[in-house]
Image (cartoon, rainbow, N blue to C red):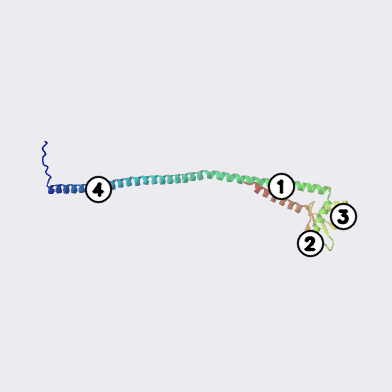
């Protein structure tokens, strides 16, 4: 038969003391761990926030620096382009002015040539048919009030003689007066105290003026 030894429980005061000490140590350890955790969390959070803020600041500063650099580079390029393009602009303006001057001179040459040819044609036609001056007299009288008295026509002496010779019936309608101051192709009409130019010069001048206006308008249309 096995023998049993009786077990003796420790006193309650001893057990209570140990439990109280253990609980106090556990509470102190818990408080210290919480405090250390708070400090570690604050420190790590501060370091993380500082690093993140520094990184964000560097990124933003880099972006701002890139923007500023691009703007400055763009302004510098534009300034250099303006500096380089100034002589080109001046050259283009000079070429355009030269072109305009050339076109103006060409127009004047064309007008002068047309006027010269027209005068020669008129002179030749009147030399062959001086009676054509009477048609100009008719046109001029049509623009004037009806004459109650006789009409006087002033002509170059040579043309007057030829008209009287070639068309005496038509010439008899008016009084033809020789005026040595008038060039061939020129004549004046006087009726009731009114006088008008019926010659070729003023008609040719009007035609030349219209030609100059037409050429000038064409030049404006083709100008770049």
Name the residue furthest right.
169
Would you say the residues marked 1 and 4 are in contact, meaning their CB atoms lie under 8 Å apart?
no
Depth check: give the residue in front, 60 or 189: 60
Question: Which residue is disc 4 drawn over?
Answer: 34
Q: Nearer the viewer, residue 140 or 163?
A: 140
Label 2 sits on residue? 194
Residue 55: x %, y % from top left: 36, 44
- In the displayed structure, 77 sits above or below 186; it is above
Q: Are marks 3 and 4 in contact (CB under 8 Å)?
A: no
Identify the residue at horizontal 71%, vertical 47% (top origin). 112
Given residues 25 and 153, the one toward you in this image is 25
Furthest residue toward front? 1
Q: Nearer the viewer, mark 1 or mark 4?
A: 4
Other-residue count near label 3 (Cα within 10 Å), few / some / many at <14 / 14–19 / ≥20 = few
In screen coordinates, is 73 left or right of 139?
A: left
Residue designated by label 1: 112
Kindly report which numbered mark, 4 or 2, lies closer to the viewer in this rendering. Answer: 4
CA gap between label 2 and label 3 equals: 22 Å
The image's mark for residue 20 is: none
Mark 1 → mark 2, Cα distance in angstroms: 33 Å
Q: Which residue is mark 3?
A: 170
**Labels 3 and 1: the sequence-earlier one:** 1
Q: What is the spatial separation of the Cα atoms under label 3 and label 1, in whole angstroms?
A: 35 Å
Q: CA distance from mark 3 to mark 4?
A: 139 Å
Coordinates of residue 46 in the picture (x, y in percent): 30, 47
Q: Earlier in the sequence, mark 1 or mark 4?
A: 4
- Viewer can see residue 158: no
Image location of residue 4, percent across then percent down: 11, 39
């Amino acid at each position: 038969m096995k023998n049993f030894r009786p077990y003796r429980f420790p006193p309650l005061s001893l057990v209570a003391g140990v439990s109280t000490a253990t609980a106090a140590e556990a509470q102190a350890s818990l408080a210290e761990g919480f405090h250390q955790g708070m400090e570690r969390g604050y420190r790590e959070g501060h370091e993380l926030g500082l690093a993140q803020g520094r990184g964000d600041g560097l990124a933003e500063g880099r972006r701002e620096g890139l923007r500023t650099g691009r703007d400055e580079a763009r302004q510098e390029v534009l300034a250099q382009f303006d500096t380089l393009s100034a002589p080109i602009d001046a050259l283009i303006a000079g070429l355009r002015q030269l072109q305009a001057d050339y076109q103006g001179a060409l127009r004047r040459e064309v007008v002068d040539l047309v006027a010269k040819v027209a005068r020669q044609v008129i002179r030749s036609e009147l030399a062959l048919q001086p009676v054509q001056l009477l048609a100009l007299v008719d046109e001029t009288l049509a623009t004037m009030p009806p004459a109650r008295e006789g009409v006087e026509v002033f002509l170059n002496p040579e043309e007057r003689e030829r008209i009287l010779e070639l068309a005496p019936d038509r010439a008899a309608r008016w009084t033809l007066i020789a005026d040595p101051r008038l060039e061939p192709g020129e004549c004046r009409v006087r009726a009731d105290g009114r006088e008008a130019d019926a010659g070729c010069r003023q008609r040719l001048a009007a035609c030349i003026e219209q030609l100059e206006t037409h050429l000038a308008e064409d030049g404006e249309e083709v100008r770049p």
